[in-house]
């Protein structure tokens, strides 16, 4: 089973504004609302792939009720801790002419130690050895990154595979607990290692350094239009970027994480998991808001996706 944990979810409101200009009067062409937050996005895409997951975390107020209702309508099981604090609403301004997305995100309400303890107790009681737990996105306001690291360490000690998608100090503390998988982008990996990684060779060496120094077993590095690089065990794979009509980049990384969790939980060959992750991420950017791409789009891009076994010291060979 896959459990996704979203500690700072959001109701995502996406507005389409062609030719958006800051400081000017702008006209909204289209508006849509979606249940959001990185872990929630992962659960949505897993459902689109035909898989199942349990969405967990913290919800509150009217926005929280909206999020849970939407997830239940998608047949996604929910096991959230409910609070009186209103779940935040984020605004995504998408300019389809310039292919630019501007995020206007709220901070979210603080979570007490009691609420956080309830979240972990729920998770601890449900996750069994071999299960996958995805921690994705920002922590609840006031939650120290060291607390999440302690959760990761405790779950991994019970043979639960933890997948982490975070940045900054949360990522830095999280990798110290040796989660099974991390999914940084190039900038996040550079920040983690305190060095600038520009070329695929540098990214690959950086991913291997993280694995050697921390015990992380799988590193997936998203590289935007340039595709992605995956490192696992003694192997590395490079996925080429797919050409698509990009409408919004919101949720692309979450879609990649969903495909990784779904594929690895199902025991699929790594090369197939990487191809699927590349295809789902590309399919996501063809959608507005944080809606999930249709299965036929995912399948078409999966058939186009090329993933090569990669060794910086040797010529690439198709796996």
Image (cartoon, helix red, strand yellow):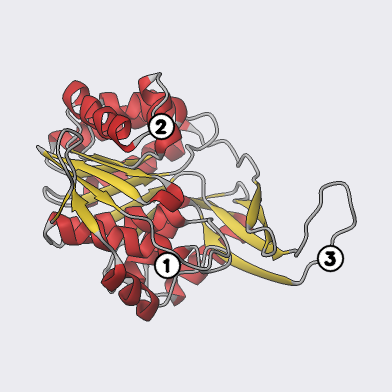
In the rendering, which numbered label is found on residue 180?
Answer: none
Q: Under tag 1, what secondary structure?
A: helix
In the rendering, which numbered label is found on residue 27?
Answer: 3
Toward the top, the furthest residue is 194
Q: Nearer the viewer, mark 2 or mark 1?
A: 2
Q: Which residue is mark 2?
A: 198
Q: How many neighbours does mark 1 have within 10 angstroms: few (below 14), some (14-19), or many (20 or more)?
A: many
In the rendering, which numbered label is found on residue 283?
Answer: 1
- Cβ–Cβ under 8 Å for marks 1 and 3: no
Q: How many neighbours does mark 3 have within 10 angstroms: few (below 14), some (14-19), or many (20 or more)?
A: few
Residue at the image point whose x is 38% and y is 56% from the top: 241
| Left or right, 213 with reference to 96 | left
Toward the front, the furthest residue is 315
Distance between the alpha carbons at the discs numbered 3 and 2: 38 Å
49 shown above or below 122:
below
Toward the bottom, the furthest residue is 296
């Amino acid at each position: 089973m896959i459990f996704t944990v979203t500690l700072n979810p959001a109701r995502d409101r996406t507005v389409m504004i062609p030719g958006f200009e800051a400081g000017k009067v702008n006209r909204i062409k289209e508006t849509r609302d979606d249940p959001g937050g990185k872990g929630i996005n992962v659960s949505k895409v897993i459902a689109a792939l035909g898989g199942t997951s349990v969405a967990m975390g913290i919800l509150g107020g009217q926005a929280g009720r909206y999020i849970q209702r939407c997830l239940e309508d998608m047949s996604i099981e929910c096991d959230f801790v409910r609070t009186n604090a209103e779940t935040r609403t984020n605004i995504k301004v998408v300019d389809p002419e310039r292919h630019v997305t501007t995020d206007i995100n709220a901070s979210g309400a603080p979570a007490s130690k009691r609420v956080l303890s309830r979240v972990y107790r729920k998770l601890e009681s449900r996750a069994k050895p071999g299960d996958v737990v995805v921690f994705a996105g920002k922590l609840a306001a006031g939650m120290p990154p060291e607390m999440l690291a302690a959760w990761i360490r405790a779950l991994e000690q019970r043979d639960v595979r933890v997948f982490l998608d975070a940045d900054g100090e949360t990522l830095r503390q999280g990798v110290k607990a040796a989660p099974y998988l991390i999914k940084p982008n190039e900038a996040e990996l550079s920040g983690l290692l305190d060095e600038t990684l520009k070329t695929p060779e540098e990214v690959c060496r950086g991913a291997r350094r993280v694995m050697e120094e921390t015990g992380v077993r799988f590193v997936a590095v998203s590289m935007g239009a340039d595709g992605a690089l995956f490192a696992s065990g003694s192997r590395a794979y490079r996925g080429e970027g797919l050409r698509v009509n990009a409408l919004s980049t919101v949720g692309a990384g979450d879609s990649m994480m969903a495909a990784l969790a779904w594929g690895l939980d199902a025991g699929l060959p790594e090369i197939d998991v990487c191809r699927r992750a590349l295809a789902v991420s590309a399919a996501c950017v063809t959608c507005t808001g944080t809606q999930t791409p249709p299965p036929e789009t995912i399948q078409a891009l999966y058939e186009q996706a090329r993933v090569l076994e990669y060794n910086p010291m040797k010529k690439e060979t198709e796996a």
